[in-house]
Amino acid sequence: MTIDLTKTEDGYALLTLNRPEALNALSFDILRRIGAAIDEVAGWRDVRALLITGAGDKAFCAGADIKELRNRSLTDQKRGAELGQAVFARLDRLPIASVALVNGYAFGGGAELAMACTFRLASPNAVFGLPEVKLGLIPGYGGTQRLPRLVGEARALEIIMTGRNVAADEAERIGLINAMAQGDLMQAGRDFAGRFTRYSLPVLDCARRAVQRAADTPLHEGLQTEADLSTLAYRTRDAEEGMAAFEEKRKPEFRDE
Ligand code: CAA
């Protein structure tokens, strides 16, 4: 088994990278399976967020499978990078948010997978890094683009060009993760997701899409996107319900409509 995809009883999809003997390293086969799993989750109407974690107590994911990377043609190398990028980009197109639960090493492609998720929580023993320079490589599954968006260009350059480790407390301080979780990481992930999944899913989707545009759009275009998406949210039944509930001084009952 290389990945597991299940539904939790409280309404989350749970994707577990399950190759602990290789610290959940991403073979091309696993990458494709992750892509298929994300597509499957996109069709599930009864889950409110996707949680992603790694099996075992040592690693979330130690990156691309280095043994597979050797002796490849340049064309295959480029296709591999494009495959990883395309698989992780599918997380953006999911109609629900994704939360990486980083339970140990998140190196290279593993850090890149976590960064492609909407949110990141980490256990205190988590260690992040983009150590590709140590292999004579650079990140290829989105790290050079997503890390500076999260932590700023100067920090991203330093982390990528030195290949150094970033411990969980530093990751929290610099904004690479949303929070460091004390105690059970899975429970912390559910609690974290529960803070937003009680709201209307289509409205949350509008918010997510608007914020995601901020990173790669000039301000005037981003503001136009915001106007369009806020109008879309306004047209939902849940917006009508939310505003009515405010006036009637009661709790809203959102129906994801
Ligand atoms: N690919 C393939 N196998 C890996 C692996 C990887 N990325 N990371 C670990 N493994 C395997 C090891 O080869 C080892 O297998 P064997 O027992 O068969 O030898 C097993 O997992 C356990 O690993 P270690 O014995 O090395 O465990 P450790 O606790 O001593 O060290 C570690 C842990 C510091 C994470 C170390 O394994 C390591 O440095 N791994 C490589 C991390 C890395 O460089 N990642 C970037 C990959 S390139 C990339 O991801 C490019 C990109 O942008 C997509």
Image: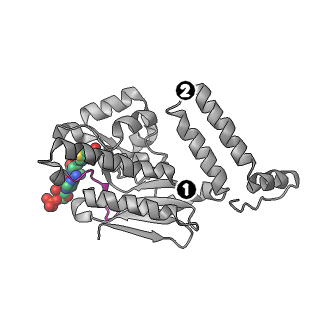
Identity of the residue drawn at 48% across and 63% down: 41
Q: Position of residue 178 (x, y in %)?
A: 49, 46
Where, quadrant-wise, is the C terminus in this rendering? bottom right
Observer-side mark, 1 or 2, equals 2
Judged left or right of residue 247, residue 95 is left
Specify whether residue 63 is painted magenta: yes
Give the labeled residue for mark 1: 96
**39 to 223, vertically: above or below:** below
**122 to 160, vertically: above or below:** below
Where, quadrant-wise, is the N terminus in this rendering? bottom left
Residue 126 can be seen in this image: yes
Residue 185 can be seen in this image: no
Q: Amino acid at mark 1?
A: Ile
Identity of the residue drawn at 32% across and 45% down: 82
**79 to 241, vertically: above or below:** above
Judged left or right of residue 83, residue 90 is right
Judged left or right of residue 133, residue 11 is right
**Category of crowding for the residue at label 1, using alpha-carbon neighbours closer than 10 angstroms: few (below 14), some (14–19), many (at least 20):** many
Q: Residue furthest bottom?
A: 9
- CA gap between label 1 and label 2 equals 25 Å
